[in-house]
Amino acid sequence: MQFLVLSFKININEERFLKLVLIKKDGNFFMKTAVVTDSTAYIPKEIREKLNIHMIPLSVIFGAEAYREEIEISATEFFEEVKTRDLPTTSQPPVGEFVELYKKLAAEYDAIISIHLSSGISGTYQGAVAAASMVDEIKVYPFDSEISCMVQGFYVLEAAEWALQNKSATEIMERLEEMRKTNDAYFMVDDLSHLQRGGRLSSAQAFIGSLLQVKPLLHFVDKKIVPFEKIRTRKKAMKRVANLLGEAVKSGEPFHAVIIHANREAEALEWKQELEAVFLNVEFTISYFGPVIGSHLGEGSMGLGWVKK
């Protein structure tokens, strides 16, 4: 494999250099596109390395101590910490981290697709947009997934696989927009006291809800997490989510689906087996709620998300 670097001047308001890094393969040249995401996609490190995915972490903050998730604190470590400490706050990456990474990637790539969690729950996407405007060396395409966790990860994995196939950045962006039409996700909150500790539920609501074993179902609407239904008991809530998946995949077309758990891996594996026996046209994987998203939903939460292949 050979590389060809072309530099030339153009005038767009100001004189700047554009650099195109082309890969020569089988006698033809292709442009290289980098894929960037943030830690809330919760894509395992080995998969990120295999697919050349670049990750910028968000952080959880316990008092004066900040930890970058997926780097300095794992999901398992986080759920142990919150058992004995006050609920942490969360923090988006500094714009400077985006700028630094984008400039570094400019030495090897000619375009960047930067995919991030919903702009309705975090300023991370806006940080990527701001950084893109500060970098002249390379064209950056920020993408608002309008969702989070491994459903956001579906976009990232697809972009990375297309980039490895030498698809252009514009082709990849068009594919991501197409994926929006069929993706969805629902999250069941198990611990109402956790929501109450985070200021998202009053003490009275949490107390009454716990007595009644209410399990709120949440989903994304217009980029924000909003209530979908309140269901009595965990078992009924999970059955309701499975029924929603059934409605989405009833055409028989192939789908990807992911079960997302907050420190409940054994339960997630069991649910996966149950769902696989029912939905033969769906390929299931298992992921997790990491520290940042887990700090808002709490331990024991479960989610199910999907997208058409």
Image (cartoon, rainbow, N blue to C red):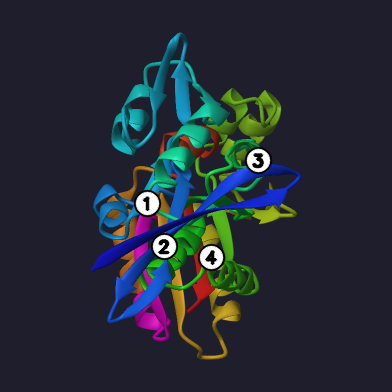
Q: Amino acid at mark 2?
A: Lys
Q: Nearer the viewer, residue 194 or 184?
A: 184
- The dot on residue 133 is 3
Direction bottom: furthest residue: 252
Q: Amino acid at mark 3?
A: Ser
- The dot on residue 169 is 4
Q: Is residue 283 magenta?
A: yes
Q: Nearer the viewer, residue 63 or 299?
A: 63
Q: What is the secondary structure assignment of the residue under circle 4?
A: helix
- The dot on residue 32 is 2
Mark earlier in primary sequence (2, 3) = 2
- The dot on residue 108 is 1
Q: Position of residue 300 (x, y in %)?
A: 42, 43
Q: Are marks 2 and 1 in contact (CB under 8 Å)?
A: yes
Q: Is residue 118 magenta?
A: no
Closer to viewer: mark 3 or mark 1: 1
Left or right: 88, with 206 as reference point: left
Q: Position of residue 246 (x, y in %)?
A: 54, 79
Q: Amino acid at mark 4?
A: Ala
Q: Position of residue 17 (x, y in %)?
A: 56, 46
Closer to viewer: mark 4 or mark 1: 1
Q: CA distance from mark 4 to mark 1?
A: 15 Å
Q: Amino acid at mark 1?
A: Glu
Q: CA distance from mark 2 to mark 3?
A: 20 Å
Residue for point 46% across, 49% down: 36
- Residue 13 sits in which quadrant? top right
